[in-house]
Image (cartoon, rainbow, N blue to C red):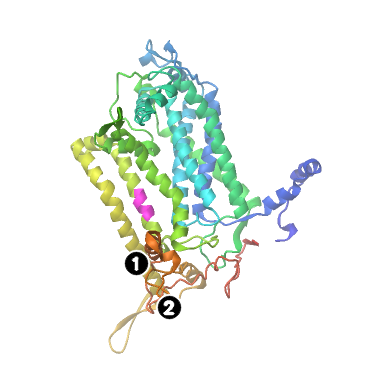
Amino acid sequence: MSDDAVKIPPAVSGVGGWLDDRFHGAKGVRVLMRKVFPDHWSFMLGEIALWSFVILLLTGTYLALFFEPSAAPVVYHGSYAKLDGITMSQAYQSTLNISFDIRGGLLMRQVHHWAAIMFMVAIMAHMLRVFFTGAYRKPREINWLIGIVLFTLGMVEGLLGYSLPDDQLSGAGLRITEGVAQGIPIVGTYISYFLFGGEFPGTQIIPRFYILHVFLIPGIILALITAHLFIMFHQKHTQMPMLGNTERNVVGQPFWPYFLLKGQAWFFFIFGTLVVLATFAQINPVWLYGPYTPLAISSASQPDFYMGILEGSLRMMPAWETNFLGHTISWSVLIPALLPLGIIFTGAGLWPFFEQWATGDKSFHHINDRPRNAPVRTGTGVAAICFYAILLLEGANDVIADRFDIPLYTVTWIARVAIFVVPIGAFFVTRRICIGLQRKDQELLSHGVEIGIIHQLPSGEFIEESRPLTAEERAVVESKHVFTPLPSVEQADDNGVPAPAARGPMGWARGVANRAFAEAAEAEDGHGYGHGNGYGNGHGELGEGEHAAIGEGEHSHDEH
């Protein structure tokens, strides 16, 4: 790109010149403005999470001006007549005041709550996109781990947030939190005592949660998002497999003005969507639940969806406890609290390194995979989704039993069986579907695309005409990355000695994993069909004929 490609408005130029004379930042700003980013609809999922977090900060600041983080008892005499004269905490009273007496308070509360849900939905969708396309591979493992930490902090922040109003529903969630803390062997009672400042519920938990919710965790999330964006900017964004996209270039649009204006429009669209939801879709009507009392519990009590997996695992687990050295270990609480999230988060965190170990692939990857071209990865992702979904549904087992007139324990036993059977079945079914789609791609490469015109031959046979794939279509289909199989135990040298990497139990396990990852549909000539034509070999070398195709209005940067 030439220096004239980015036009700076005169007003901005004057201010920028004044600042540059003092801070010498023009060069960095110029680099930012010229930075080219690829453009694809799925890349906007991360921006949804970003702008949802910005909206959370804005609405949370407004709510913090009126919220009273105190568990001190007061007698309510506010606008909501049905609770007039009821003793409640100052936190619950201030929440009612925000909802009924503060101008725009209820709207801000609901926008804040919907933005929190949107934030978690967007993070989940963004991480699934990254996982299924393999965008976590070298050199982006650190950004993948940051995403997992962000999702974990989002869950904790949500738990803290909906616990602050001190209503009956949030109090039930706090009671579960206390039970989980006490379920930790040996130190559980001490953790619960220090967390709540004494016996549950106490008077210290709300101000403590308020500090964590308003100051500490949002600051950590903001720092991690900043690090995430800086790393993405430095390493460049991944691209979808398309004609002209290689490992050494970026085909897309510059940050200024395209992505800057697009991001602003996206922010206002998300904000408008949340306002519409807050206006017409009621969420968390705390005045209907009443103030929290440890003596009561409401039916159909479920947390927000991102915490539903813990609720479901607690309901699914049968009663089980043992005594060890005078200590009672409540496995029925400890296992549901730690195992499901441990499987999902630990598995997700280790997956990039496991895949690299299994495939032996240490090259850089700036081009995304098509999910069909990675059957094991795609099958594992679908299995994890099924695992999560079953636990989420089990978290509402009482509602399901009531709505469908099914005995509650029948629903629970169905979930106990499904939690093992469904993910395993989903893995194998998804894997076979991916291989079937690969065979379809082979057919397209060999025979072209059927165009719907049928001819009758003189012999009476009917044939359907087809056309060859276009250059754009062929680049996508041929973008499959072919792994080089690692040496197996059977492959020995002239002296019958197997390769060192193939020896022992770890060598055998790595060989099995390598064959699974390298699995692909066999072409008619007995070989895989991937040639890597869409993106080079990962070592900075371009294959013959690989050039950055720049469409009208597009820009490309070579990255060295």
The residue positioned 45% from the left and 13% from the top of the image is: 72
Residue 345, image quadrant: top left
Residue 62, image quadrant: top right
Q: Which residue matches tag 2?
A: 494
Q: Give the magenta part as a residue range.
A: 380-385
Q: Residues within 10 Å of mark 1 (few under 14, many from 20)?
A: some
Above or below for 139 versus 278: below
The residue positioned 74% from the left and 58% from the top of the image is: 3
| Residue 140 within the magenta-colored segment of the rendering | no
Indicate the secondary structure of the residue bearing disc 2.
loop
Residue 164 falls left or right of residue 460 = right
Q: CA distance from mark 1 to mark 2?
A: 39 Å
Which residue type does callout 2 highlight? Asp
Above or below for 38 versus 107: below
* For discs 1 and 2, the disc positioned in front in the rendered view: 2
Q: Which residue matches tag 1?
A: 436
Residue farthest to the right, as pictured? 21
Where in the figure is residue 110, as x and y percent of width and height? Answer: 45, 31
| Residue 381 within the magenta-colored segment of the rendering | yes
Where in the figure is residue 76, as x and y percent of width and height? Answer: 41, 12
Residue 541 falls left or right of residue 395 = right
Is residue 369 visible to us here?
yes
